[in-house]
Image (cartoon, rainbow, N blue to C red):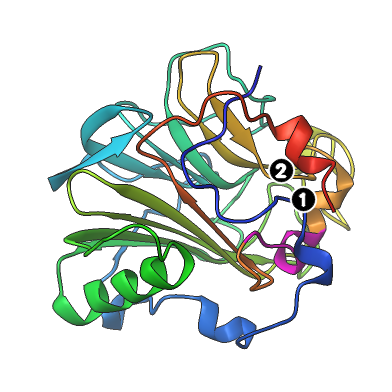
Amino acid sequence: METLWAFLLLTVGLALTSPVENSKASLMYPYGIDQGDTKNSKSDDGTSPEITIPVPFTFYGKKYYSLYVNNNGVVSFGVNVSQYTPDPFPLDGGTPFVAPYWADVNNVIGGDVLWRQTQDQAMLSRCTADINLNFPEIPFTATWTLIATWDHVAYFGSVSNKVNTFQAVLITNGELSFIMLNYDEIQWTTGTASGGKSKTGLGGTPAQAGFDSGDKINYYNIPGSRTPDILKIAETTNVRRPGQWMFQVDEYVVGVTTEESDCLE
C-alpha cells in the first residue's frame, strides 16, 4: 500500500484544469554558472560527486547529510544512481531518492545538469514564501536549499532536437523538509536503450516522476509516471500552478493512498 506524506497539499491529478497563476518561466528557480551552479561532467549515466550538506534533510523520517545529483533525472541519498530505465515504485532496492524525471538523459548529446546548495538569504526568502503560500498551516522558515536543474537535456540515442528542462528544489529548516518539482518544457519520455524511438524520444518505458523512501513500502508516483502521459507533466500540478508539484516529505500520513487520491476530481 502506498503511503502519502504529511500535508500533501491538494488532490493529485488535479492539474489539467487548474488555472495558471504565474507564467511557466517564473516557476523555475534561477540557475546557471552565473548563479554559482556546479555543472556535472558530460557523461552518459553520470553523476555529481557526493554533496555534503550542512543542514540535515529529513526524508521519510530519516536525516540525511549528503546526496547526489544524477544525470538521469534523480537526486539520491547515500549512493549515486546510474540506472537509466526507471523501475516502478516502490523500488526493490534500498536507495531513497527524489525523481523529478527519471529517464535516460544523455548530456553528452545535449544540455547540462547543474546544481547548487545555498543558504543565501534572498533565495531562502523565496523558498520560505513558496512554502508558506502553499502550506499556510505550517510555520516554516527555510535555512537551506538545493537547486538541481536539468537544462535542455537530450535523451540517449537521440537524432532529434527534442530536449527537456526540469528542476528539483529541496528545502529544509533541519526538521521540516519539502520537495518542489518544476517543469519548464518536456518534449521526450524515453531513450533508445529503454525502448524509445531515436527520432521521437517516445515509446518504450517512459520516465518516472515522484519519490521513494527505499524501504519498499513508502513512496509516491506523480500520475502518468511510466506511461505516455508523463509527457504532459508540465501541464499538471498539485498546487494550482501547472508545471509545479510540491510536497512535505519529513513525516508520514497513514491511510491515504495514491490510488484513492488519483480518483478524485
Q: Is residue 179 magenta?
A: no
Residue type at mark 1? Thr
235 relative to 210 in the view: left or right: right
Q: Residue 25 in the image: x percent, y percent?
A: 58, 85
Q: Which residues are magenta?
A: 232-238
Q: Is residue 198 visible?
A: yes
Residue at the spot of label 2: 207
Residue at the spot of label 1: 189
Tell which of 92 and 179 is nearer to you.
179
Query: Which residue extends farthest left?
Result: 54
- Residue 185 vertical placement versus 41 (above, below): below
- For the residues labelled 2 and 1, the Cα–Cα distance comes to 5 Å
Q: Which label number is shown at residue 76?
A: none
Q: Residue 185 in the image: x percent, y percent?
A: 69, 71
Q: Residue at x 29, y 70 (%)?
A: 128
User: Regarding mark 2 in the picture, which secondary structure is present there?
Assistant: loop
